[in-house]
Amino acid sequence: MKIDFHVHGKITSSFPFDREKFLLSIEEAKEGRLNSIALTEHCHADNFLEGYEYLSNNYNLVDDYYNVDGFKVFYGMEVTTLQKLDILIIGVPLDIISLKEKISEKYNYEEFIDINKLFELIEKIRYLVILAHPYRKHEKFPELSNTIWEKIDATEFNATDLYNNGIVEMQEKVLKLAKINNIPIICGSDTHHYIQISSVKNIFTKDCTTVKEIKEEIKKQNYKTELSSDLKVRVKSAKIIKKLTKELGKK
């Protein structure tokens, strides 16, 4: 299995889910030798359920993934916390929707949810939990309790951060954080435009069909991460397109 764990269906949180561009993302992923992604829309995005509704209305759920013409799409969300840390949570679609509703009960769009309250809602066995781009908003990583670290399955080499901060420099920082807290590292492209989706991949020896299987394989480290040789070009191009799209959207 070759998977990207961090893909968005919206170019920005305020834009609608674009079905055409989502399918283009899958075609681009296939060209980049991926056969799976996790759709992890921002929890605070406008009309968050659009992506879920599109998938559930048009494709069959097989085990824990949607079968999009032979391509696996796992389902999740990215949750921003009060502490300015972003958490990717991937699971059975209905579990993700249920968790989203619970978060919304405690969610303040100006302040976001406290990370401790978030992790009180997360059942370790049920979800794959990834600490996304840990240094995007922090030069020095904030302290987290052991209870929280115990529920985190991995942290992330994030393609956007690798581009913005230097591949070697950012890898070294994330490697050090992972080693101190004894957690694995996966890759996430942080795709908002389909041109970015093949910038990274995680290559598993096992063809996983459930979140539980993926969690077990990550824990055993039965996979390897791979950065594309054109990562910088893909991320830079996507950033330019995203900026132009936002500017046009304001007009």
Image (cartoon, rainbow, N blue to C red):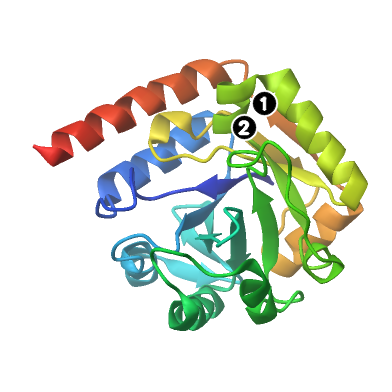
Asked if residue 210 shows in the view, the reply is no
Crowding around mark 1 (Cα neighbors within 10 Å: few <14, some 14 to 19, many 20+) is: some
- Check contact, mark 2 vs mark 1: CB within 8 A: yes
Residue 39, position as x, y percentages in the image: 49, 55
Horizontally, residue 204 falls left or right of residue 25, namely: right
Compare residues 111 and 45 and report the one nearer the observer: 111
User: Residue 180's spot in the image, x, y percent?
Assistant: 91, 46
Report the Cα–Cα distance between label 2 and label 1. Answer: 5 Å
State the SS at label 1.
strand
* Residue located 71% across and 58% down the image: 208
* Residue 140, numbered circle: none
Q: Which residue is mark 2?
A: 200
Q: Which mark is residue 227?
A: 1
Q: Nearer the viewer, residue 36 or 150?
A: 150
Residue ID at (56%, 28%):
199
Amino acid type, callout 1: Leu
Residue plotted at (82% across, 71% down): 147
Q: Is residue 227 left or right of residue 93?
A: right
Type of the residue with mark 2: Val
For residue 141, what is the image quadrant? top right
Find residue 2 and report its horizontal and vertical position in percent.
Answer: 66, 42
Classify mark 2: helix, strand or loop: strand
Q: Is residue 250 visible?
A: yes
Q: Quadrant of residue 129?
A: bottom right
Residue at the spot 63% in from the left edge and 67% down from the top edge: 115
Q: Nearer the viewer, residue 109 or 219?
A: 109
Of the residues under marks 2 and 1, which one precedes in the sequence?
2
In the displayed structure, would residue 33 be above or below residue 101?
A: above
